[in-house]
């Protein structure tokens, strides 16, 4: 769990290889305020019990080497299979929600705690589980893991390798990953929430290319259509923002990669840029960001359902610079979080069954 009492925060618990499992479990249950202390999710009826036992839903990884390792260190999260009981800490995770910025993911963790009515024990605060490193931030809020991934695909890829191993060692079942991001919109008002139905690279190709052992391996980037559809239906009539579905272009860079003319370099004209954006729009592209391709391809490769939901910060048809006020930015970035919260409440059967009620 991601909860540490203020008293406990000061002293660090020592774990060592070969530590008696019972002692280790006790320490972890005190340190992370185990799931018995938070309100259990309502996915516990008899139908779901059967589902829980069904091994088809367990996270499996296509790496035979993992089975031969005596210890696996999830280096960028300062977690390890020999110092942490990952199953005890994370075994009940159903959703992994990801955003670029550690600050935004911390806000999301607090927000989702309230939305899912997760009760922290008296004196406990939500704590960054990866607080010994400044690479990523990681929070656990009942069945939700909230993790930051930094900017760009290399950073997302490292996060995904380690979080996928985490959910694998934790024996998590039926997990869904959702990227909750910001993006540049194409032909959309700023503040629109885009649910991606497809992701493409800067050349309109729905594949993520990874050079491995000197050869390019192309992994198809595929999102889960049903989840995209469910997210889209989490719209409420009184929302002040639109939710649309569209293709997301994932680029290697924020400036030239996204046809901006305001980077340090630019050897094309405003007209060239306009034509590129118009051509993208004609091909169904509604926003641009920098992580979705690696996200969709890696999770599809791991046979895990995933979705991408991003708010647009500007309409790229009208300019390149993002110059909104801080308050507007804060309000915009919470919009996709609200949609995802409704979706998770619905899946966890909290509140009304009939809709994505908040
Ligand atoms: O998850 P976020 O909203 O941080 O992702 C987008 C894409 C880039 O990483 C970054 C550029 O500002 O924002
Ligand atoms: O224009 C934008 C805005 C946010 N993120 C991007 O990648 N591009």
Image: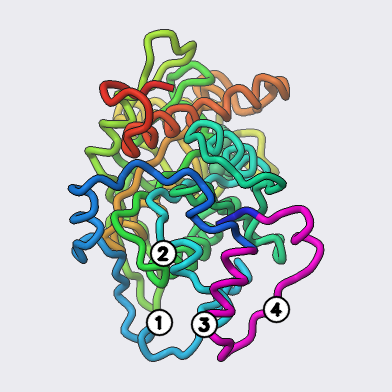
Dot placed on the residue nearer the N-terminal end, 3 or 2: 3
Q: Nearer the viewer, mark 3 or mark 4?
A: 3
- Mark 2 highlights which residue? 167
Mark 2 touches mark 4? (CB < 8 Å):
no
How dense is the environment of label 3, judged by Cα within 10 Å: few (below 14), some, or many (20 and up)? few
204 vs 231: above or below: below
Mark 4 vs mark 1: in front? 4
- Which of the two discs, 3 and 1, labels the residue nearer the N terminus? 3
| 331 with respect to 185 (left or right) | right
Residue position for label 4: 14
- How far from the left and from the top, in percent, is residue 212? 39, 76
| Position of residue 279 in the picture relative to residue 192 (left or right) | left
Q: Magenta span has 337? A: no
Q: Secondary structure at mark 4?
A: loop
Q: Are marks 3 and 2 in contact (CB under 8 Å)?
A: no
The magenta region covers 4-30
Disc 3/disc 1 C-alpha distance (Å): 39 Å
Q: Position of residue 283 (x, y in %)?
A: 29, 31
Q: Circle 1 is placed at which residue position?
A: 213
Q: Which residue is mark 3?
A: 21
Compared to residue 215, the image places residue 105 above or below, namely above
Residue 268 visible at all? no
Give how far apart the Cα atoms at labels 1 and 2 are: 27 Å
């Amino acid at each position: 769990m991601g909860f540490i009492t203020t008293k406990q925060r000061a002293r660090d618990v020592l774990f060592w290889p070969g530590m008696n499992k019972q002692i280790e479990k006790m320490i972890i249950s005190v340190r992370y305020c185990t799931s018995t202390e938070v309100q259990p999710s309502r996915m516990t009826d008899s139908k779901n019990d059967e589902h829980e036992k069904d091994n088809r839903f367990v996270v499996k990884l296509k790496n035979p080497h993992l089975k031969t390792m005596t210890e696996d260190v999830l280096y960028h999260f300062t977690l390890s299979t020999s110092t942490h009981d990952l199953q005890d800490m994370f075994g009940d995770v159903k959703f992994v929600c990801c955003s670029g910025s550690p600050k935004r993911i911390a806000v999301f963790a607090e927000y989702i705690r309230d939305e899912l009515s997760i009760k922290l024990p008296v004196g406990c605060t939500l704590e960054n589980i990866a607080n010994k490193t400044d690479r990523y931030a990681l929070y656990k809020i009942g069945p939700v893991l909230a993790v930051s991934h930094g900017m760009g695909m290399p950073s997302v890829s490292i996060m995904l390798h380690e979080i996928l191993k985490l959910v694998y060692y934790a024996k998590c079942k039926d997990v869904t990953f959702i990227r909750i991001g910001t993006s540049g919109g194409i032909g959309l008002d700023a503040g629109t929430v885009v649910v991606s139905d497809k992701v493409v690279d800067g050349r309109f190709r729905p594949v993520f290319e990874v050079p491995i052992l000197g050869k390019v391996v192309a992994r198809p980037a595929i999102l889960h259509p049903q989840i995209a559809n469910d997210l889209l239906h989490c719209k409420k009539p009184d929302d002040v923002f639109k939710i649309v579905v569209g293709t997301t272009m994932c680029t290697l860079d924020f400036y030239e990669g996204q046809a901006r003319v305001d980077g340090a370099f630019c050897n094309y004209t405003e007209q060239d840029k306009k034509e590129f954006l118009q051509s993208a729009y004609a091909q169904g592209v509604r926003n641009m960001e920098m992580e979705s391709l690696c996200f969709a391809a890696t999770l599809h490769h791991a046979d895990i359902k995933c979705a991408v939901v991003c708010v647009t910060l500007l309409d790229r048809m009208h300019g390149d610079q993002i110059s909104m006020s801080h308050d507007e930015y804060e309000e915009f970035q919470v919009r996709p979080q609200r949609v995802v919260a409704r979706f998770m409440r619905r899946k966890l059967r909290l509140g009304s069954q009939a809709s994505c009620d908040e």
